[in-house]
Image: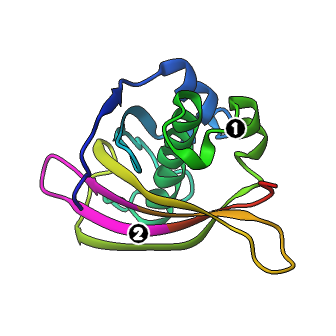
Amino acid sequence: MTTPAVDRSYATDTELLARVLLPYKEHCRYLKSADVAAGPEHASARCGFAIPESCYIDDTGHLNSVEANIAYNQMMYYLVAKSVQEGLLAAFRDWTLEDFWRRQLPDILITRFAGTYRRPVDPRSFSGEMVIRSVSRREPGGGRPFLHADTSYRYWDADGGRCDGEVTLVFVDVR
């Protein structure tokens, strides 16, 4: 995955991060840091994660698909919230943070989640990156308008573990 050219960057906003993670049970708050970068038509987050203990299964010794998805959700929510806060992406420029908080759980849907594990990733300490490659408004005939976002992600650890994939998001109720 190649990260596009950057013209703005933002270090982790700890207050924003804490608010983004509020809906998660404390032992499921995997995202520890998220530095955001943005260019003219994209935004990305480079993140640090730690999963000391799985929230649902005995220790597998590697990052599994359920926790990869939870980590993606946290990374994505933070990146969208930061994009709203800083006006980084045109699709979200009319949103306020209050709009985001109201939409965070009910209106942001993963419609496709794909991942490929190249080498096992240590869940106790790993890094991740997500790129919002495009966001477009769609207005289907007779249906409600929505935002369609194409994203990509990757995870890695200090021992060469690697996982990457693509996710399609839909933001509903955007009238």
Q: Is residue 91 above or below residue 101?
A: below
Q: Name the residue under label 2.
A: 166
Q: Where is residue 22 in the image (x, y as percent from the top left)?
A: 66, 32
Q: In front here: 143 or 23?
A: 143
The segment highlighted magenta reads 152-167
Residue 135 at x, y = what percent? 53, 59
Left or right of 153 in this view: 74: right
**Is residue 115 visible in the rendered structure shown here?**
yes
- Quarter of the figure with the N terminus: bottom left
- Residue drawn at point x = 47 percent, y = 54 percent: 72
Dot placed on the residue nearer the N-terminal end, 2 or 1: 1
Tell me what residue is drawn at x 56 percent, y 25 percent: 16
Residue at the spot of label 1: 95
**Residue type, numbered disc 1:** Trp
Separation (CA) of disc 2 from disc 1: 25 Å
How busy is the neighbourhood of tag 1: few (under 14 within 10 Å), some, or many (20 plus)?
some
61 vs 5: above or below: below
